[in-house]
Amino acid sequence: MKYQLLKIIVCPVCHSKLSFDLEKKELICNVDNLAFPIRKGIPVLLKRDARNFIL
């Protein structure tokens, strides 16, 4: 995934900024506690594919 995308990609649920978890290859929304997967270098920004997490 290109890091420049982090400047423009937002959470599809609440529209807040996302952070990148390099180890798990996920985009993280700290507002909704959702982790969106990145598959084959492409962010999957679908709520049904996101997993819930607690910090």
Image: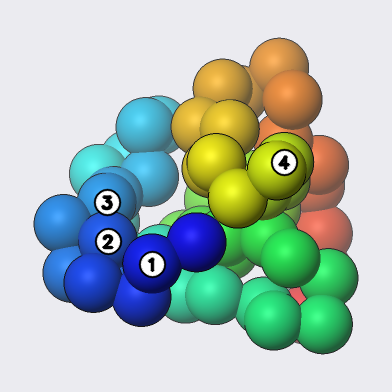
Q: Position of residue 37 (x, y in %)?
A: 71, 46
Residue bearing the label numbered 1: 2
Which amino acid type corresponds to the residue marked 3 in the rendered image? Ile
Q: Earlier in the sequence, mark 1 or mark 4?
A: 1
Name the element at disc 3.
Answer: loop
Q: Residue at x 74, y 65 (%)?
A: 25
Picture layout, residue 40 above or below residue 4: above
Alpha-carbon span between mark 2 and mark 3: 6 Å
Which residue is tagged 2? Answer: 5
Q: Amino acid at mark 4?
A: Arg
For disc 4, the marked residue is 39
Q: Position of residue 16 (x, y in %)?
A: 28, 56
Sort mark 1 into few (<14), some (14-19) or many (20+) by Cα contacts within 10 Å.
Answer: few
Q: Total number of numbered labels?
A: 4
Looking at the image, can residue 42 be seen?
Answer: yes
Asked if residue 31 is positioned above or below residue 32 in the image, the reply reads below
Reading the chain from its start, which is encountered first: label 4 or label 3? Answer: 3
Judging depth in this view, the residue of 27 and 14 nearest the camera is: 27
Q: Nearer the viewer, mark 1 or mark 3?
A: 1
- Structural distance between the alpha carbons of marks 1 and 2: 6 Å
User: Rounded to the nearest whole Å, what is the CA distance between mark 4 and mark 3?
Assistant: 16 Å
